[in-house]
Image: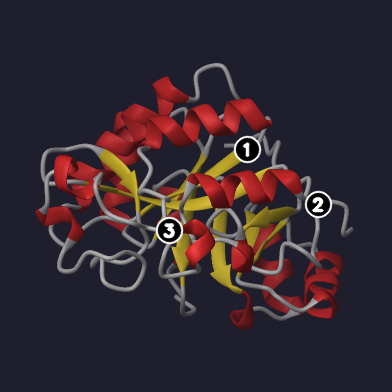
Amino acid sequence: MTHTWPYPPIVAHRGGGKLAPENTLAAIDIGAQLGHRMIEFDAKLSQDGEIFLLHDDTLDRTSNGWGMAGELPWEKLAQLDAGGWFSHAFSDERLPLLAEVAARCQQHQMMANIEIKPTPGLEVETGRLVAQAARVMWENQTQPLLSSFSYRALEAAQQAAPELPRGLLLDSWDENWQAMTQALDCASIHLNHKLLDQARVALLKQAGLRILVYTVNKPERARELLQWGVDAICTDRIDIIGPDFC
């Protein structure tokens, strides 16, 4: 199946890259201020089924909370400081709901790569609920690109909202990449850029896949990958690898 690909070549990693606390509305605002047209962020479920942004399974690294985030109800998660760890200037920042992020994307006219980041054991439920929510929340925007390292989460997303484009995330090379992406009817494959050389890029493109790579923070490497035919670069250095980089 041929998939449309409306996405730009530069994607702001976790909203604001290294310039703001990751996966927050402040990060999205900073990405927008620099003119970025697409962001990547991580979505998971609270204990009571609310979809919110957080990369890790635990709260410890990027908030003043601790323990497994998915074991807490949204009422508790909503009270946490998700910015103070980054700097005092962001100390009032909160964990955002997916609905708030969708509204901010619409406000800034930014596209989205939603990485489905399930709490262990909740892969299917998270994939299903994120896909169903994304279908509604982005109804009047460019369809969000759904991605995950979890095959089961992407499979659930495929069943729940088959029309939304999907990308399989791999952090190590898997010789079964073609079978997996075909089974999931993926538009793209999302890879650690260190896995790629020019021959592998050509192989993936020959299979009809778009390629998104992470996390590229050196302009010369970004330029090389784009010249090889990579479709999208996810970067933390949103200040030096900007929306008009290529």
Residue lying at 35% horizontally and 38% vertically, measured from the top left: 97
In which image quadrant can residue 13 be found? bottom right
x and y percent of residue 34 in the render? 77, 50
- Above or below residue 245? Residue 125 is above
Residue 200 % position (x, y): 67, 75
The reply to whether dot 3 and dot 1 touch (C-beta < 8 Å) is no
Q: On the rendered structure, is 29 left or right of 50?
A: right
What type is the residue that disc 2 sits on? Pro
User: Mark 3 — residue?
Assistant: 91
Distance between the alpha carbons at the discs numbered 1 and 2: 12 Å
Give the residue type that dot 3 points to: Ser
* Residue in the foreground of this view, choosing between 71 and 182: 71
Q: Is residue 197 visible?
A: yes
Name the residue tied to disc 1. Answer: 111
Q: Residue furthest front?
A: 88
| Numbered disc 2: secondary structure | loop
Q: Is residue 161 visible?
A: no
Q: Please tell me whether mark 3 or mark 2 is closer to you in this view.
A: 3
* For marks 3 and 2 on the same chain, the one whose residue lies earlier in the sequence: 3
Residue 225: image location, x then y, percent: 78, 71
Q: Residues within 10 Å of mark 2 (few under 14, many from 20)?
A: many
In this rendered view, identify the residue nearer to me: 122 or 12: 12
Q: Give the position of the N terminus as an image quadrant.
A: top right
The residue to which callout 2 is attached is 243
Callout 1, which amino acid? Met
Disc nearest the viewer among 3 and 1: 3
Q: Residues within 10 Å of mark 3 (few under 14, many from 20)?
A: some
